[in-house]
Image (cartoon, coloured by chain):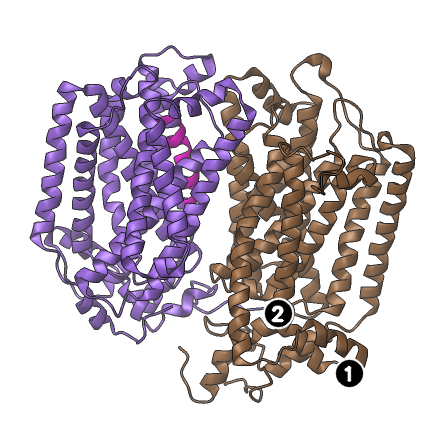
Chain colours: A purple, B brown
Amino acid sequence: MHPAREWTREEVLAATSKPLPKSLTTMTLALAAIGFVIWVAGLFIAPDRAWRAFHFNWLFFTVLSSAGVMFVAVQRITTARWSREVIRFMEGYVAFLPVAFVFLLVILFAGKGHIFPWTHEAYPNHEKATYYNGSFLIARDIITFGILTVMSLWYIYSCVRLDVGGSPESGASWAAGIRERMRTGFGEERREIHSTHSMQGKLAVFLALVFGYGWSVLAWDLSMGLSLHFTSTLYGWWFFMGGWLCGLTTLSLLTMAWRNYLGAEELIVEKHFHDLGKLCFAFTAFWGYLTFGQYLVIWYGNMGEETHFMRLRLIHPWKWMTVTSVVFAFLIPFFGLLSRAAKVFRPTFALFALCSLLGLWLTRYVEVYPSTFGENVTSLPFGLWEVGAFVFYLGVWGFCYTRFMDAFPRMRVTLMTSPYRDEVQIPVNPETMEPLPAHE
Amino acid sequence: MASAAAPRPTGPGERPNVPSANNRFPAVRDYEQVDREVIETLQPSFGWFAALATAIFCLLIGISTWIYQIHEGLGAAGYQPPVMWGVYIITFVFWVGIGHAGTLISAILYLFRAGFRTSIYRVSEAMTVFAVMTAGLFPIIHIGRPWKFFWLIPYPNWRLLWPQFKSPLVWDVFAILTYFTISSTFLYVGLIPDLAVLRDKETNPIRKRIFAMLSLGWRNSDREWRHFMRAYLFMAALATPLVLSVHSVVSFDFAMALTPGWHATIFPPYFVAGAIFSGIGMVFTIVIPLRRFFRLQHYITLNDLDAAAKLCLFTSMVVGLAYLTEFQIAWMSGNKVEQDYFWNRVFGQWAWAAWIMLICNMVLPISLFSQRLRRNTTWLFILSIFINIGMWFERFVIVVPSLSHEFEPWQWGSYRPTWVDYGILLGSFGWFFMWFLLFIKQLPVVAIAEIKEILAPRMRSQHGGGSH
């Protein structure tokens, strides 16, 4: 489960602190700039598509990032040890969330007329008129996503603080102030491990509650509500579990990239890839289960008020996009990642992870576009504007991520090397730091 | 796996109940102690005989009631249109649900390497098998003419009579039979090394012979362990999807219909979460008295119960999210029938049942946020009884109000279970606990081999090796 030998803190820091090349930052900024230019051009040439592309890419990148933070919190809830070497690669996702918050404001205030049907369609009933009332929706989404963002930042701050506090000063200069703040009041290591663990235990559970309830509401408002005539009780769960799977596949790819870049073959071992592969496989199966479960109930029920949503996605021009998304998100990675060999051989794992990400990205497209365009299009609206928006988001996400990863230790050095690291694996009294009795 | 070392002396200042990450059972010193203490639980006692007699008595009540019902007809059980599904289907879903936590604990938590499963998985897995055996009786009882049951099974088509494969009720037959096959095989495979221990320790020649056959000639060799671990892993991987699929299929019995309150896409995962929640409730109901009567507190530790309680809290929150989602979507859908149904659920004829459900399943488990209560076995036991009641009423709330308040007012009716329903419900508990009580006196309730696996590093450190 752990690397073969015991590492000292200095060794881990030395092995993982190679600064990222400037060219990578330039590249992320260039991608963002190219995407932005395409998007701005789109606003003049095809504003509906530009805004809708902006929206579905927001859904893809934001749920992925939020679910990533949730997965980090789940490591605390389950007191996982296997992920200490790789989980910081996921903690970096949090850096995108404040930006996503700004983008959400842009969507809700500037783009709503091109995205949301409630701005221009008649409400089918007075309940929908109440629920999808513009001001009510905007207010609750800002509050919900705001709370999610703040709690996510708080959680990751507490994780990073434990490592910054226990390590010599290093990292990108822009974050020197944050690191300084993290060190203020950082006490004796054993005490800090216990108090952080105790605080995170509560925070992680509340984050889980906000994640589940919050993304259910956001899924109804920002994705399901794009069709004012459709409701499905499973939609929220299906929606955020897609993001959860994206978070895991992205982590797998980033772990491969970091391992190569840092040359950390001794720290990140085959077992990590096997575990990540198993998680990707398990949640691919789970996503397939939810997708099929939702579809089967609607198909069997055969009620017009539900089937119109599926029918629209299974007729021209959306049909092949829908089929492709399911093939890439479920069929290929499910069968591909069945064997152990495919999980630990990194080229195959990377291929199936990329397939999964592509499929889930297309799923977000299939959530948004058919509902907003309906049957009034003769050919599939997919091309420059959609890819441009993706490039923009990829650049912005990559920029946020690389800034974060250059500012803080790349691994959980304290929990990897502290002599007290395993004291919190069992229930402990955080005040006395003594284990609670095992039995009466 | 013979005894490897002498008991480790307790060090200065070391209390026998202080655990650490690498020593989860501080009061368990060596392999001999494990063998001795676990095998001691197999000795019959007065309490056990009394419990078994009570279970058999309840079962006899159930059997007599069933015979009465067969003679009188299904009308004796309080069924009248429009409510033709009642206590039997509710209890069927209840018992299938109970089984799920067992497979979750034994298979899924095994794959996730969750340490706390070790001490409780054997009880849970046995509970699964007996719960499925109990659940399987109810469709047969509900048919009214139980001898027609074989019509559901796709036997050779010599009378041109095939089951209706498009009916979720037939899917249930496949789901339950598959589940029973896999979970009983999984239970048996996990038992093999323990059966060998029993064989070696047994003095009665007949029992020794039986254990010898059942343990398949297990000799504890390296090669056997390698094959065993591989087989066990495969069984766990096969059992895992069943945790999701079986209760999803059960949920389809409802979700596929267009009845108000039933046709909901969330039903499959919501049923699965509810099943795991109810199953963990039953695990507590069984394990907490068991560890006390068998004096197994130092195996089934408070830390294990604490972790299981967290899982219980998590599934309660998932179920709570599903309840609230159903209300929200029913309202925002604008569908009058759905809206009326959900209004009726909490303020109508069956409101008392819905409030029992909401309080037992959503409100009371909030107490598990407190670590002190998670480690209080009395509270866990009381809460588990509430969870069992709450989850039975959850199925009541799903089944009865939907059928009694369908689309048109002239279709509306009422339902009142009779003593026949209650007799058979009681009988089902008798049936379940009879098997369970018989099991715990024949086979070990904690997995001897897996407990020893956890002890192993300590043996090494005693001989000078480091395990940290």
Q: Nearer the viewer, residue B455 or A229?
A: A229
Residue at image coords 84%, 51%: B59
* Viewport quadrant of the N terminus of chain B: bottom right
Tell me, yes or no, whether dots 1 and 2 are on the same chain. Answer: yes
Q: Callout 2, which amino acid?
A: Ala
Residue B115's spot in the image, x, y percent? 50, 65
Give, as a three-letter code, the residue at label 1: Thr
The image shows residue A353 at horizontal and vertical percentages of 31, 49
**Above or below B463: residue A147:** above
Quarter of the figure with the C terminus of chain B: bottom left
Residue A134 relative to residue A296: left or right: left
Picture quadrant of residue B74: top right
Q: In this rendering, is residue B148 above or below B125? A: above
Measured from the top left, where is residue A95 in percent x and y?
23, 45
Chain under label 2? B
Q: Nearer the viewer, residue B239 or A55?
A: B239
Work out whether residue B363 can be spotted: no
Name the chain under label 1.
B
Magenta region includes residue B276: no
N-term-proximal mark, 1 vs 2: 1
Residue bearing mark 1: B203
Q: Residue A211 in magenta?
A: yes
- Magenta-highlighted residues: A208-222
Q: Main secondary structure of the magenta part?
A: helix
- Provide the residue designation for mark 2: B447
Residue A192 shown left or right of residue A99 in the figure: right
Badge 2 crowding class, 10 Å Cα cut-off, few under 14, some 14 to 19, many 20 or more, is many
